[in-house]
Image: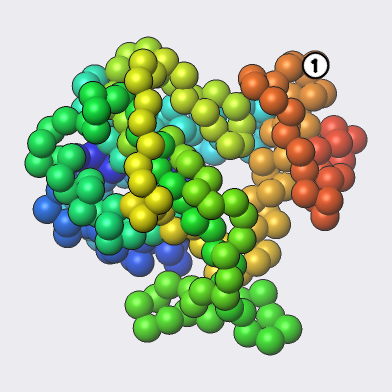
Amino acid sequence: MLIGCKCLNEEKTVKRVIGDFHDEPWVDKIIAIDGDSSDYTVQELRQFSKVDVYVHRYLDWYHDQEIMQANIVLSYIPHNEIVFLLDFDERITQPLKEVLGKINEAGEMPDGADLVHIPRRTIDVLRYENSPFAILGPDGWPMESHEIGQFPDYQPRLIRKTHKMHWVQSPHRALVGWTQIVALRDECHILHYEKDDYRDREWIERRWLRQNAKRISLGLPCDLYEVSAKPEFANAIDPNYWKGER
């Protein structure tokens, strides 16, 4: 099975994220699309023998860049191959690993589907007092504080690639071109962690909103639905916030 991921300035998370599943027998190759990171993300990725890294510069002023990066990942997946997609703030639970192993062994998607939605549980992390920094456990992952968001929060993550498939809707993408979809049971889920440094979350939110602000300034409609900004970042979806830039 192939694993697909995209990243930008994830130097500090590469070892724990990739190392968590790299040596699983069902993992054949990991395709990583790097957005021309300014840190040592690419070098860290190249320490893993199953990882193939391709650099495609992330232009955060382009109104559809988030989706473009996701579609670039798909472009490296051969037709009819099964690929599992993972972000660098996520972890595969053991029950999900076991299911992925069985799928890989069978060479078939569940119920003949070409898209599988996988539950995702989002957790906030413990942080040092009066600090944006997470407390890391012995395994290098942030220690859990409490669950946030809405579980199961199904995510389109397991795909049998066809030439008709592509992603739409920045930043929370949706796949089009599939023919049959199924969902895994709740215990087979992805863990989604808040950032080790909360300030990185602020940077990501503004980066996403910048692209939507650009789309608005161009008079382009959204693909599926309008993006709502968190109150603390609401000014970043206003095109005037980015006035004078590209």
Question: Which residue is the site of mark 1?
Answer: 219
Look at 23% across and 46% down and name the residue there: 100
Amino acid marked by disc 1: Gly
Q: Residue at x 62, y 55 (%)?
A: 149
Q: Position of residue 18 (x, y in %)?
A: 31, 58
Left or right: 231 in relation to 43: right
Q: Residue at x 84, y 45 (%)?
A: 234
- Quick check: 9 above or below 229? below
Q: Tell me the quarter of the picture where residue 63 sits.
A: top right
From where the camera sits, is residue 33 visible?
no
Q: Is residue 240 above or below residue 145?
A: above
Task: Give the position of the C terminus as an image quadrant.
Answer: top right
Q: Quadrant of the N terminus?
A: top left
Q: Quadrant of residue 5?
A: top left
Residue ranking furthest to the top = 164
Residue 159 in sight here:
yes
Q: Position of residue 186 (x, y in %)?
A: 40, 51
Q: Is residue 245 left or right of residue 196?
A: right
